[in-house]
Image (cartoon, grey):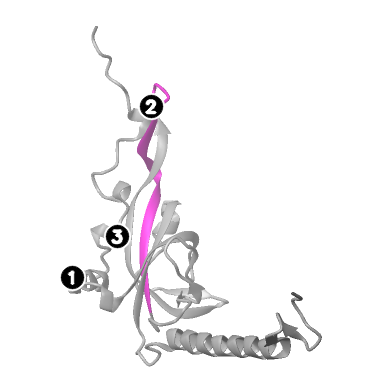
């Protein structure tokens, strides 16, 4: 039996032109459904008011002269102008780094000069934006961020991105008072958690 007969029918039953029309119609229906679904996802909650977005930035191994020029109330700078992103809290700790003891074993230690700085900035933006931007830069957890004010510029990493409605009242109060909550800090940067400097680490001989 021929697949296509003289009249252009598949297996003598289905007209190939009709089949093509049905196929095109199915594609068009699918495209319309996809467009409506995609539009619904991207416009959901579009009328929701802007709210403060708090972004926690981690700047590691800063020299003291840099860290001491970061001030609460400073605005981030981008493209040669001030942005609406404002520094609300700053925390400074001795920088954590890996040193080596007398046996050559790697030891987590504190640098005697450098500082690890955690900075929280905030700006009112739409919670429903597909791309969240604070200080005119995209913010995602783990994303690199250029921390730049009028007097300071440093590379940083985004550790937290949260809207005020997601935070507890206690956390919001701490941030508004310029304090970085303890759970925002890396464990190695929390007071009392770091080991003594590597150059002072020694091992006590075990008596035989």
Q: Regarding mark 3 in the picture, which secondary structure is present there? A: helix
Residue name at image x 81 percent, y 86 percent:
6
Residue name at image x 65 percent, y 88 percent:
24
72 and 104: which one is in front?
104
Which residue extends farthest bottom?
A: 47
Most common secondary structure along the magenta stretch: strand
Quadrant location, the C terminus: top left
Which stretch did the figure color magenta? 102-123
Q: Which residue is mark 1?
A: 170
Residue name at image x 41 percent, y 52 percent:
64
Q: CA distance from mark 1 to mark 2?
A: 41 Å
Which residue extends farthest right?
A: 6
Q: Is residue 115 left or right of residue 191?
A: right
13 and 128: which one is in front?
13
Mark 1 or mark 2: which comes first in sequence? 2
Q: Which residue is mark 3?
A: 184
Q: CA distance from mark 2 to mark 3?
A: 30 Å
Residue 190 point in image, percent of width and height? 27, 50
Q: Regarding mark 2 in the picture, which secondary structure is present there? A: loop
């Amino acid at each position: 039996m021929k697949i296509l007969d003289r009249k252009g029918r598949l297996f003598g039953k289905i007209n190939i032109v009709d089949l093509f029309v049905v196929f095109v119609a199915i594609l068009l229906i699918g495209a319309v459904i996809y467009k409506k679904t995609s539009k619904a996802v991207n416009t959901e909650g579009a009328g929701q008011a802007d709210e403060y977005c708090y972004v926690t930035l981690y700047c590691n191994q800063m020299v003291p002269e840099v860290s001491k020029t970061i001030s609460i109330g400073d605005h981030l700078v981008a493209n040669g102008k001030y942005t609406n992103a404002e520094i609300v809290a700053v925390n400074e700790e001795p920088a954590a780094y890996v040193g080596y003891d007398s046996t050559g074993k790697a030891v987590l230690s504190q640098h005697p000069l450098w500082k690890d700085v955690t900075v929280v900035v905030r700006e009112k933006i739409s919670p429903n934006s597909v791309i969240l931007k604070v200080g005119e830069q995209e913010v995602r957890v783990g994303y690199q961020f250029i921390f730049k004010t009028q007097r300071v510029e440093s590379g940083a990493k985004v550790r937290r991105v949260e809207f005020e409605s997601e935070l507890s009242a206690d956390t919001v109060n701490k941030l508004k008072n310029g304090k970085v909550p303890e759970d925002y800090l890396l464990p190695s940067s929390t007071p009392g958690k770091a080991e003594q400097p590597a150059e002072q680490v020694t091992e006590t001989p075990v008596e035989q």
